[in-house]
Structure formats: C-alpha cells, structure tokens
Image (cartoon, helix red, strand yellow):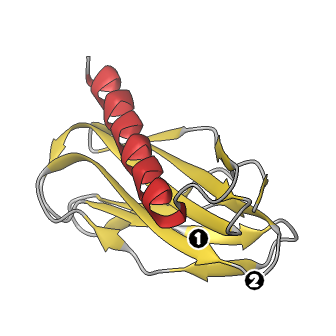
Amino acid sequence: MHRRRTVSSLLSAVLAAGIVLAAAVGASGTTHTAVSASKSVTVNGVVYAHSAKISTDTGGHYAVAHTNLGASTTVPSGWLGTYPRLWSSSGTIVKTVGYSYSSRAATSWSSTVVHQSQKAGSFYSQGCVQVWNGKGYNTYCTERSPNQNA
C-alpha cells in the first residue's frame, strides 16, 4: 500500500512538472519528455523513491530538469529535499538551483530548473535528493535521464 502511494505521489509530481513546462514554453514547438529509472532507499523504515525527468521544447529551445522524491508515508516538514540539475549531453552542468525542502508534511516533493538557450542543444537531468535520518540528511543522486533535444 505504501509503495503505491509513493508511486502515485511521484506521478503527481511529474504531472505538475509537465504543467510547469507547458506554461514556460507555450505551444512554440515539439515537446519531449524522458524519465530516469527510479531508485529506492530505506531510511528508518521509510521507503523513499527518487528519479529525474527532462522535458524539452524544440521551438523555444527550452529544457526543464525535474527532481522528484516520494516517501512511503507522510513525513514532517523539512524531511524531503530535492536538487534539480540540468546537464548538456557532453556532461557539462548547464543550470541548477540549491536544495528545496518540503515546506509541509508530505509524501512527495519535487523541484524544477528551467533553461532557455539561444540555440538548439541536447540535455539530460540528473539531480540529488536528501532525506532526514533523525540526526541529519542522507544524500542520494538520481539516475541520469535519457538525453532530449531542445
């Protein structure tokens, strides 16, 4: 039951991130999305699943990196942290923001970074997450998403 809630929470976060992309790029070109494999870790009996997603738009040369984190049960405010990072396909970091922590009790948390380029490019998303272990944060990095053109 808890695993279903985690997957449901991650899917909700991915859907919300897609809405952010749609608002950012409008209908300027072709939109593509790719998601990394999900990884799970267990900390103090709570299962956390995390993944990275890349959304691109070829018309406006937009790339949006999303980092998603879900928990098998509701955890207190501040226990979930996400750090999205957008990379060029050559492995150079293009854009990032600092960690964003859950501002309320939650079963999922995600954050996004948006980049618009003057020219076409190929990008992927690979972020990191932090989960509270009772004394500090454990840090894990997501799998790399497939490359997408923007």
* Disc 1 crowd, CA 10 A, few/some/many (<14, 14-19, 20+): many
Q: Is residue 127 visible?
A: no
Give percent across and percent down for residue 17: 43, 52
Camera-side residue of 125 and 60: 60
Position of residue 79 in the picture relative to residue 131 (left or right) = left
Give percent across and percent down for residue 69: 39, 49
| Amino acid type assigned to the residue bearing label 2 in the image | Gln
Q: Nearer the viewer, mark 2 or mark 1?
A: 2
Q: Is residue 123 visible?
A: yes
Q: Quadrant of residue 130?
A: bottom left
Q: Quadrant of the N terminus?
A: top left
Position of residue 85 in the picture relative to residue 57 (left or right) = left
Camera-side residue of 76 and 20: 20
Circle 1 is placed at which residue position? 85
Q: Secondary structure at mark 2?
A: loop
Q: Quadrant of the C terminus?
A: bottom right
Circle 2 is placed at which residue position? 118
| Amino acid type assigned to the residue bearing label 1 in the image | Arg
Give percent across and percent down for residue 31: 65, 49
Camera-side residue of 118 and 73: 118
* Disc 2 crowd, CA 10 A, few/some/many (<14, 14-19, 20+): few
